[in-house]
Amino acid sequence: MVSEWTPRMRALGASCAIALTAAMMTPALASDVDAPEIWFEDIEAEARFGSRDLRVFTSAIWKAATTGRDLDRAALPDAIADDADQRIVFVSASDGENAATVGMGSGDGLADATRDALASLRDRSDADVRWLIVDIVEDVTPSSEVDSVDLRDGRIPLMGAAFSRETALAFLPGEITGRGLQNENGEFEIFNAFTFLLDRPDEARRLQGAMQTGESPGLRFTTRSYFTDGQEIVSLFRGHRLFDALDTELLLETATAAGDYLARSVGPRGQFVYNYLPDQDINDQDYNIVRHAGTTYSIYQLYTVTRNPELLEAGERAVGYLLDRIVPAPNAEGDELCAVEGGEIKLGGAALACVALAEYTEATGDKRHFETLQRCARWIVSTQLENGEFAPHKMTFPEGTPMPFNSEYYPGEALLALTRLYAIDKDERWLDAAEAGAKWLINVRDGDKSIGRLAHDHWLLYALNELYRERQNPLYMEHLKRITTAIVGRQNLTPEVRDWYGSYYNPPRSTPTACRAEGLGAAYALMRDFGDDEDALLKKQALDALENSVMFSLQMQYRPENAMFFKDPNRAIGGFSGSFTDSSIRIDFVQHNLSALIQLRDILLMEEESRRESLPPN
């Protein structure tokens, strides 16, 4: 038993571990809480109420929660006021600074159950209400019938967990994911729940009693949910909002929120919080200089749009950290520079350092790092073989010994670095090297591959878009279209679960989808500007796939409704989680989604401008 919850103890620290151990050794005390008359096994009627009625219902609950008054039954729609079926309702509220408090209630009908939930909420907290979620329990399933693999992969909705009636204990899906009550397989973990309840002694004693008798959550349940902040009311699907349309205003809003997250994540020395675990409110201490450089690039992409001084300041610190890791290259014949981390040199590190410094130069007009940018590019070129291949992709530092590692993305990053530098200094040697690298990738690496076997290389699509604009070799356009066809053909358009639509892989993750969206944006831009009539269908497919990708990934951006169960909800807002079952926020998750948002917004703005220009004059 101890081995199962020791990792959680380590995450919480020694003091929590001691408290947990002591509690486990203490006999459970009888609870003075009466067993509820209505419990989850009694729920038979689904919440078959119209969306409009439930929005009015949510508004009435908001008014009661924020004023301290009783729920106004006269303000409820008739279908809800007259409901007499046995119901369980949760009302969760947060002041915006702390984790949500949850009130659970039951009764004959929604109105009575909600009054009970509001009373429970008030007993637990008197904090101001800024965000509120209403959850109406719908489907209840014995835990033995829940497929744990499907739960982990997200094929079935994230589910709440209820213990026996005598314990009066149940946890919402949002509590399980937001408070870290699940294990690494996405399953409810009773020891994590016990740790969470240590500051709620009566509930902890009840759960302790269940643990000592070997009881586990015998029922799993789903809910119908609505969120409100007093301004908008949003229907939630599996704890997040769905997106079925995009516009430039929404894209700017979500991109700005992502940029704000990154700006908050840059420390005084310029190092990002690399991987934040919001369900535990801890930072993962790992790091990756390639991702640091890519994330810095995305900050300056957004700064070009918003001119936010806080972004500029954060970007300056991030650039400073990057420059501290750029050193003279080993075995160099000249003054080449490379990026070093942990005793290793990576081609991708130097390449994305160039991309970030080029974006910095373009966004700010400041050329003080331009020499560093050129010296990094010279090192990239020095690694290129006569046939155009970049090798090696990784070597030791300071020895310069090649290491047995190859990345399918590093060559595309190198091409992008060279084309971005050429855009600034117009030195043809950068394009010469980029052309040689592109031809090797197209003719050798990818030469005998079918479309279905091509890497979905977004960095190469970025580079081919820019390279073709300078040297219009049909080879580049044709390969860009082949990769685009490969990406479009693998998108989930008939998914097992509604919110998987527009994604990639099974189960899907946010970042692979965002990376493909970036590549699709670059491909669409090139086909729009240089394509012919034969490209019209693929161009439309690329734009549709790009929009579908972004609508999928936006479901994993943290907003109040899917962050309010975290200990520090504001810290997570704007970040992107890894997936529906991975709540962590790593910097590259945010980077790629941010870049995709900016790409799509630029495309839609240009499309709007083209439509305006095509209108007849008044």
Image (tube, rainbow, N blue to C red):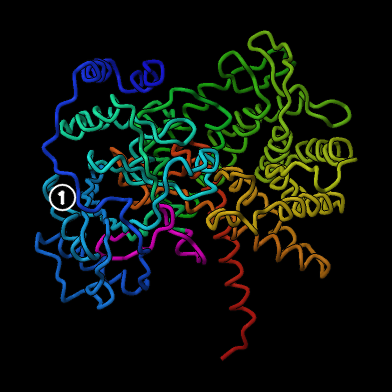
Quarter in which the C terminus is drawn: bottom right
The image position of residue 245, as x and y in percent, is 52, 67
**In front of the other: 301 or 233:** 233
**Residues rendered magenta in the picture:** 227-251
**Apparent side of residue 499 relative to residue 403 in the rendered image (left or right):** left
- 483 lies above or below 163: below
**Apparent side of residue 577 relative to residue 548 in the rendered image (left or right):** left
**In front of the other: 280 or 409:** 280
The residue that mark 1 highlights is 120
Please, what is the three-letter code of the amino acid marked with disc 1?
Ser
Tell me the residue at 53%/34% (across/down): 368
For residue 352: magenta? no
Q: Quadrant of residue 232?
A: bottom left
Q: Secondary structure at mark 1?
A: helix
Tell me the residue at 81%/52% (across/down): 482
The image position of residue 424, as x and y in percent, is 65, 44
**Apparent side of residue 245 relative to residue 16 in the rendered image (left or right):** right
* Predominant secondary structure, magenta span: loop
Tell me the residue at 70%/12% (across/down): 400
The image position of residue 42, as x and y in percent, is 30, 55
Are there few (<14), some (14-19), or many (20+) residues within 10 Å of tag 1? some
